[in-house]
Image (cartoon, coloured by chain):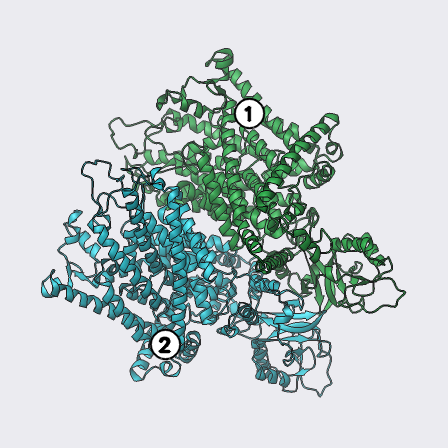
Chain colours: A green, B cyan
Amino acid sequence: MPYVFSLLLQLHIFSMEIIQCIIQRLHSIIEETPLYVVTNPYKNVPQYLKVMFQTTSSLCRDASVLGTNMVNAGDMNGSGNLMDFLDEPFPDVGTYEDFHTIDWLREKSRDTDRHRKITSKSKESIWEFIKSLLDAWSGWVVMLLIGLLAGTLAGVIDLAVDWMTDLKEGVCLSAFWYSHEQCCWTSNETTFDDRDKCPKWQKWSELLVNQSEGASAYILNYFLYIMWALSFAFLAVSLVRVFAPYACGSGIPEIKTILSGFIIRGYLGKWTLLIKTVTLVLVVSSGLSLGKEGPLVHVACCCGNFFSSLFSKYSKNEGKRREVLSAAAAAGVSVAFGAPIGGVLFSLEEVSYYFPLKTLWRSFFAALVAAFTLRSINPFGNSRLVLFYVEYHTPWYMAELFPFILLGVFGGLWGTLFIRCNIAWCRRRKTTRLGKYPVLEVIVVTAITAIIAYPNPYTRRSTSELISELFNDCGALESSQLCDYINDPNMTRPVDDIPDRPAGFGVYTAMWQLALALIFKIIITIFTFGMKIPSGLFIPSMAVGAMAGRMVGIGVEQLAYHHHDWIIFRNWCRPGADCVTPGLYAMVGAAACLGGVTRMTVSLVVIMFELTGGLEYIVPLMAAAVTSKWVADAFGKEGIYEAHIHLNGYPFLDAKDEFTHRTLATDVMRPRRGEPPLSVLTQDSMTVEDVETLIKETDYNGFPVVVSKDSERLIGFAQRRELILAIKNARQRQDGVVSNSIMYFTEDPPELPANSPHPLKLRRILNLSPFTVTDHTPMETVVDIFRKLGLRQCLVTRSGRLLGIITKKDVLRHMAQMANQDPESIMFN
Amino acid sequence: MPYVFSLLLQLHIFSMEIIQCIIQRLHSIIEETPLYVVTNPYKNVPQYLKVMFQTTSSLCRDASVLGTNMVNAGDMNGSGNLMDFLDEPFPDVGTYEDFHTIDWLREKSRDTDRHRKITSKSKESIWEFIKSLLDAWSGWVVMLLIGLLAGTLAGVIDLAVDWMTDLKEGVCLSAFWYSHEQCCWTSNETTFDDRDKCPKWQKWSELLVNQSEGASAYILNYFLYIMWALSFAFLAVSLVRVFAPYACGSGIPEIKTILSGFIIRGYLGKWTLLIKTVTLVLVVSSGLSLGKEGPLVHVACCCGNFFSSLFSKYSKNEGKRREVLSAAAAAGVSVAFGAPIGGVLFSLEEVSYYFPLKTLWRSFFAALVAAFTLRSINPFGNSRLVLFYVEYHTPWYMAELFPFILLGVFGGLWGTLFIRCNIAWCRRRKTTRLGKYPVLEVIVVTAITAIIAYPNPYTRRSTSELISELFNDCGALESSQLCDYINDPNMTRPVDDIPDRPAGFGVYTAMWQLALALIFKIIITIFTFGMKIPSGLFIPSMAVGAMAGRMVGIGVEQLAYHHHDWIIFRNWCRPGADCVTPGLYAMVGAAACLGGVTRMTVSLVVIMFELTGGLEYIVPLMAAAVTSKWVADAFGKEGIYEAHIHLNGYPFLDAKDEFTHRTLATDVMRPRRGEPPLSVLTQDSMTVEDVETLIKETDYNGFPVVVSKDSERLIGFAQRRELILAIKNARQRQDGVVSNSIMYFTEDPPELPANSPHPLKLRRILNLSPFTVTDHTPMETVVDIFRKLGLRQCLVTRSGRLLGIITKKDVLRHMAQMANQDPESIMFN
C-alpha cells in the first residue's frame, strides 16, 4: 500500500511538474534568448552542462535526478523520518555533491545498517514483518517495472520510427498513421507479388501532382524527402537543446561513468527520459546515419532511475541504485536486439562496474520481461523477438575462415579509423567555433545525408532494413536485386536448397551501389556520432560491416562458381552445390565492425548467436570478432566509449586497463615534495574558527584527523560536507557553541573549566575506519584497491604516521601520466 | 621451440613416472596392506588424505600437482633460473605450503613484475621479442589445448559408457566393442521397426544358454547384470583407493575452494585425471545413481592444471593458474551438456572466485573449442552438440504456469531434503565405523541399486537415456510406452501436430513404473553421492525432476482432455487441439530439481535454453527455477556444494553470503582480551636465536614487524616460511651469521663494533605494504576486503599502533559463530 500510494503521488507530482516546467521553459524561450547559449556556448560539454543545469535547476528541477533529492519522497512510507533523525542528526548527511565520486564501501555499509534495522524491527509486529517482506521484494518489483516500461518504450519507438521513416516517402490513404507495410498489409491485394504496388499507399508525388513516374515526380519526392528529414532533425535538436541537454549522444560513456560511482544529477532524470525517447524517434526517422540501440540503453537506465527513486532502499543509497541501473542497461540491450542473454552479458562486460551475482540474476529477469513485453507489442509484425532474424540452409567450410578473418581485419581497421577520426572531430567541436552552432551542424549533416542518400536505394531505406536485407539468404521467392542470379532452367530442386549460380545484372548493379553506400556510410558516420542529438553506433557500424561482408561474400561465391576446379574449392564446392552463403558473410562482417568499434567480445558473439539462434555459426563469428579486436587493439587499446570518456575527462577507473608501472604510493600521494604539508584536523586542539578557516581556504573533500600535529598518528577521516553541516547545525541549535569552541573528535571530551566555551563533539561524523596503505605499497596494488573497493580516497602512512593522501583523481592522473597522456584531462573528483 | 621441448620432456617424464609408480604401488599392495588404511581410516576426509598423501609423496609424487614443484620444469625455457636467483635469493620463496591459502594481491603483483621484465627485455633482441609474443599468446594456446583435451576425453567417456552400459545386458557378435546402437546400426536390417530385434546383438542368455525369453533367461540376465555392475563398481573403488584418492566425489566443492585461493596439492594432478576418467566410465556404466557432469568439470580442471604447468607464466603463479582453471571449468560444463554459453556462466556464477573479463573471453574460447571437439567425435551419433536435444511443437499457455510453479516447489523441497539427508549421511560416514569400509559400502549400494533397478524398465536403462525419453514429445512414430495413447481413427492430421488423446494402457503402466522409479531414485541418490567413487549430481537430480514433471504433465494432459469444458481449460484447450506437452513439464521439473539442489539460477536457465535452442520456453523454466530457489532458500541458504565445503571445513569465503552483523574488527582480531600478546618481531633488536625460538614455539604463518615493542608502530610483515628459509640460507652461506647475530629489517643497519657478530639483513623478505584496518572497522567491510582482495591476513591498528591480526580463518570462524555454527569446523588456514 505505501508503495502504491507513493507511486501514485509520484506520478501526480511528475505530471504536474512537467506541465509547470513546459510553461516556464516556453515562457523563457519567448521572452528572451536562453542565458546559457550566450554565457557558455558548448565549449566543454560537461562543464557547460553543469553550469547550465545549475542555472536552470532553481527554475524547475528534475525531481528524480540521480542523486538524493528524492529522499523525501522515499521517506513517505512509514517512520522513515523519525528513524533518520535519531541516527543521523543532520539532514543531508551521507549525500554527495554533483560531479563527485561516491564511496562504495560507505554506501554498502549504510545499506547493511538499513537492512539490519529492518530485520530487527520485523520481529516486533506483523505489520513490520510485512514491510520487511515488501522491502526484500522491492528489488524484483523494480526489475519488473523496468522491464515493462523499457519494453513498452522500445515497442513504441519501433512503431513510430517505422511510420515516420515511411512518411518521408509517402502516406497511407486509408489511415495516415499506418506505415507502408501496415497500410499494404491491411489492403486486400496481399498476394506476394502485389505487395509493392498497393493502391492505398501513395508517394507524395502521386498525392500532390498525381504523377508516380518521371523526372518531375522524382525531383518532388527527392525534395520532400529532404524537407521531412530536415524538419525531423531540426525538431530533435531543438527539443534536446531546450528541454534536456543530457539527452544527446549515445549515453553509454556517461552511464559507464555513473555506474562506476560518479554523480551526474539529471543525467538519468525524467526529462531526459521523455525527450530522449521523442527525439530518438525523430532522428532515426530523419535518415541520419545513427542507430537507436545505444540510446535505448540510456532510456532503459532512465526508467531504472525513475523506478528506483520510488523505493527508499534504492533512492537513498547510491550503491544500491547502481545495481538497479546495471540491470536496466541489460534490459535496454535486450529490447534493442531482442537478445536477453546478450543484454545481460553486455551489461556485465561493457557497462557495469560492480556486478554482484544477485544483480546478474535480476538483470536477467529484467531483460526477459523487457523482451517479452516487446514481443507482445510485436512491432516487427513477425512474432519474432529478434531484430534481424536469419536462417541459413548451408553449413560453413574451413576454407571460408580465410575470408572471415579478412573481414575481421577490415572490422579492426574500420574501428581504429572511426575512433581516431571521430575523436579528432569531437575534440575540434569542443575547442573551436564549430561547437557554437550545434543546430546548424545537425541541419547541415542531415541535409548532406539526405541529398546523398536518396538516389542510392541502399542508403535511402532505413539502416535496419538494409542490414536485414544484407543478412538474408537468397531464397527462391526473393525478389531483391541482390538475389538476381541467372537460374539454370534445367535444375529442379527443392526451394530451400538453391545451388550457387552465376550473378545476374542486378547483382552487379547492387555491388556498385553497395560500394558507394559503404564509402558514404563510413564518412558520414564519423561526423554524425557526437552531434547534439541522440545517436547510437551499433546500427551504422553493423551496416558498414554488413555491406563489406556481403560484397566479399558475393565475390567468394562467384569465384567458387566460376573456378570450382581450384584446389581450395575442389573439396567442398562442386558444381551444383550450394556452398557459399553471402548473407553469412554480411553477418560476420557486421560482427567484426561492431567489435572493432566497441571492443565487445563475448556479449557481441552471444548477441549474434541469439540472432541466428544456432551454435552452427559461432566459430566464424568468433574468428572475426577476435581478429577484429586484435587488429584494433594493435592501434590503440581504447574502444569508442572509453575514448569518449577520456575526451570528456570523466573519472572512470576502467577494470580492463592494466597498470604495470613500477611506481609506489609515495610517488602519487599529495602533498608532493616541496608542497605545503597536508591539511589535517587534530582530535582535541582546534577551535571551530580554525576549522572554518581551513574549510574556506581549501577545497578538499575531507580532512584526516590526527592525534596531534606532532605525532601525526591517524585516528580518522572527516568529510568536508559533513563538517560544514555539523558546524552550521551546532551554531544554529546547540547552545554555547561559538567560534572559540574546541572541536573534539575523541570519545570522551575532558571536563572543561566553567568559563570556557561549550565544546563541539564531532566523533559522530568521524569515519573511524579510513582506508590506509603504506608509502611502500606498489601503485598497481593501490589501483586494484581503488577499483575493487570503489574508494574515493586512501590515506598513506609510514610506520603509523600519516604522510599524505591519494584520491581517485590522483590515481587517474597518475595513470594518464604513465600512459603519456595529459593528466590535466581528468577533470572531476 | 622451448615450449615444444618442454612439452615433450614433460610427457616423457610423465610416462616414466606412471610406469614407475604403478610398479611401486603394486609392489606395496602385494607385499603389505597399505599403511594408511590401518593408521588413519577415512575418519576425516581431507585430513586423512593429507596424511595419506604425505606418506606416499616421497614414494612417487605427482609432478604436476597444484603447487609449485613444477617450477623447475617451467624454468627450462630461457634464463629463468638466472633471473630468479638475482631477484629472489632463496629458492622456494613465494611458494605456499599444502592446505594453505594463497595471497591474491601478492600473486598479482608478482605477475606484474614478471610481465614488466618480459616487456623491458623484449626490446633487447628479436628473439626476446618473439619470446614475449609467445608469452602473450600462451594463454590462448593453453585454452586451445584444454578445449581439445577436455572435448576428446568427454567424447571417449561417452563412447565407453555407451558400450559398457550395454555390456551389462548383452554383447555385439560382429564386434564386441560395439554398443547396442552401433551394433544394430551397422547390421543390414536397419529399417525402423526392426531395430529392436537385430540378430547381431545378443543378450547374455541368448549367447550362453540360447534362450531369449522365459523365467530362467530372465534370471540369468538379471544375475549377470548385477555381476557386471558389481565388478565395475569394485574396480572403480579399488582404482580410486589405490591410485588417486582425490578422484572421488564430484570435485566441484574442492574446485570452488581451490579457485578461491586454497592449495590442495595433487587434487588436480595427472594421476587424478587418469584415474577419474577411467573410474568415471566404470561407475556410470555400473548403473549407480550418479552422473558424469560434475566429475567432467573436475577432469577438465585437471587438464587445465596439466597444461598450465607447461607454461611458466601459469605454473609459477598460483593466481594466474586459477584463471586457467576457471576457464577449464567452463569447458567441462560445456562438454557435459553441449552448452558453451551455459558453461561459461556456470563457471562465473557457481565455481569461480576471481573472474576478470579476460578470463570470461578465454573461458568462452575454451568452452567453444571443447564443444566442437566433442561434436567432431560425435558420440551421440546425431551431430548434435547437446546432450538432450528436444523440439516441441506447441507453445505454452499462461494457465500452465500453475503446474510449473508447483514443479518449482517440488524441486525446492527435493533440494532441501536431499541436502539435509545427504549431509547427515556423509557426517555419519565421517564420524562412525561406516567410513572404515568404503569398498564394502560401494559394493552394497551397487548391489541394492542393481537388484532394484533391473525389473523396472525406467531404472534399468542409463539415466541420460531415461531423461532423454522423458523430455521427448510424443511424435507419430514414437513407439515408447509413454506414448501409448488411444488414437482417434477418424483423425487425419499432419504428423507433427497430434492432438491431445486419452491415455492408453501403456501410459498407465508407465505412470506406476515412473512413480516407483522416482521413489527409488530419491532414496538411493542420497546414499550414493559422497561415496568414494566419482559421482555427479546433475543427472540424478534432473532425472528426479523429469520423472515428477512427466507425471504431472501427463496428469494435466489427461485432465485437459477429459475436462476441456472447465474454465481453466476452456480458452486454450479445445477438443482436438494439441495443448499440453508432457515433455516440457519433464524439462521444467528437471530444471527445478537441479536448481533446488545446486541453487544455480542464470546458468541453469541458459543451459536449458541451449538444450531447447529457443527463447520460447524460458519463462516456464525461469518460473520453476526461481520458485525452486526461493522454496529451497527458505529452508537453508546453502547449496549442496557449499554444504559439502562446510562439512569438510575448507576455508571458503563465499561471495554470495552476506555478512550483516554489527561486529567490529576489534571483536575478531587475535589476541583476544586475556590472551598473551601478539608475537611480533622488532626491526633492529632481536637476535637470530630469539626468532628461531619464536618460530619453534608458535605456528603462525607470519609475524608483524614493529619499530620496537614499546611503540608498537608497524613497519611490515614477514612470512614464517620465508623467515625460516632466510635464516637457514644465511647460516649455510653467509659468513659470521650465528645465533647471536642481530636481525635488521631496517633499510640501513647501523655500523656495529668490530667484535660483534655479523648482522643478518632481512629487509628483502619484509612485506612493506601489509594490509591494515583500524580496530573500529566494521566486520562487514573487513569481510568485503578479504573477499575482494583475496587476503590471507590483515593487521589491526589503532591510531598507528599495532593491536592484532585477523586471518582468513578468523574471519570464517567469526562468520560461522555469527551464523550459530561451530567455529571449530573451519580447519585450514
**What is the residue that sits farthest to the bottom in this orientation?**
B755
Residue at horizontal 73 percent and vertical 34 percent from the top: A36
User: Given the image, on which type of amino acid does mark 1 rest?
Assistant: Ala
Q: Chain letter for mark 1, please.
A: A
Quarter where residue B641 is shown: bottom left
Q: Nearer the viewer, residue A699 or A580?
A: A699
* Dot 1 and dot 2 within a common chain: no
Element under label 1? helix
Q: Residues within 10 Å of mark 1 (few under 14, many from 20)?
A: many
Q: What secondary structure is found at the residue carrying circle 2?
A: helix
Q: Which mark is residue A450?
A: 1
Q: Position of residue B513 (x, y in %)?
A: 24, 57
Residue B193 visible to an observer of this rendering? yes
Residue reaching furthest to the right: A755
Using the image as rendered, state which of residue B35 and residue B205 is in the foreground.
Answer: B205
Q: Check disc 2 and report the residue beneath it.
A: B435
Give the amino acid at mark 2.
Gly
In front of the other: A400 or A735: A735
Please give the count of numbered marks on the rendered protein: 2
Viewer-nearest residue: B13 or B246: B246
Chain assignment, label 2 = B
From this view, report whether residue B328 is shown above or below residue B224: above
Q: Left or right? Give the position of B459 relative to A433.
A: left
